[in-house]
Amino acid sequence: MIKVTFIEHNGTVRSVEVADGTSLMEAAVGNLIPGIDGDCGGCCACATCHLFIEPEWLDKLVPAEDMEKSLLELAECVGPGSRLGCQIKLSQSLDGIVARTPLGQH
């Protein structure tokens, strides 16, 4: 199991455990993390799973591809650490990852 900590925009901390291979979006939606919608179901088509990855984890992620970068241009409040949760597959190397949810997705 992979531990993921989500910090909501209001400071509420929620830690969950999910199976290896689960996307960060699936981890959030499956555990009812507020602020992560995942409207497209994880096919990188909507940007409603926008998250801010804590800086210490960014170098451990596979770099964003062009489609993800394009969709992030449509997301609100994009900043350092912005990624789409559907594009981050969790593995043992990401055990303990911390992500912050934005104020909103629309």
Image (cartoon, rainbow, N blue to C red):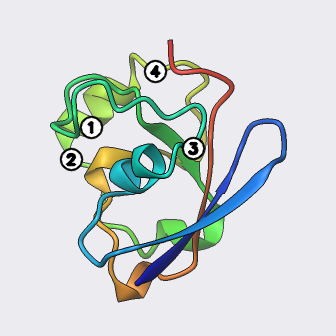
Instruction: Give, as a three-letter code, the residue at label 1.
Output: Glu
Q: Is residue 87 above or below residue 105?
A: below
Of labels 3 and 2, earlier in sequence is: 3
Residue at 43% x, 29% y is 37
Which dot marks residue 75?
4
Observer-nearest of 33 and 78:
33
Q: Is residue 63 above or below residue 38?
A: below
70 sits to left or right of 12: left
Quarter-wise, where is residue 23 in the image?
bottom left
Residue ID for mark 2:
65
Residue furthest top in the image: 106
Q: Secondary structure at mark 4?
A: loop
**Given contact means CB atoms under 8 Å apart, are the residues at marks 1 and 2 in contact?**
yes
Q: Nearer the viewer, mark 3 or mark 2?
A: 3
Residue ID for mark 1:
68
Of labels 4 and 3, earlier in sequence is: 3
Q: Nearer the viewer, mark 1 or mark 3?
A: 3
Residue 2 locus on image (x, y percent) = 44, 80
Does residue 84 show up? no
- 3D distance between C-alphas at marks 3 and 2: 25 Å
- 3D distance between C-alphas at marks 1 and 3: 21 Å
Quarter-wise, where is residue 19 in the image?
bottom left
- 3D distance between C-alphas at marks 2 and 4: 16 Å
**Given contact means CB atoms under 8 Å apart, are the residues at marks 4 and 3 in contact?**
no
Of labels 1 and 3, earlier in sequence is: 3
User: How many other residues sit within 10 Å of disc 3, few (<14), some (14-19) or many (≥20)?
Assistant: some
Residue at 31% x, 35% y is 69
Q: Is residue 78 above or below residue 90?
A: above
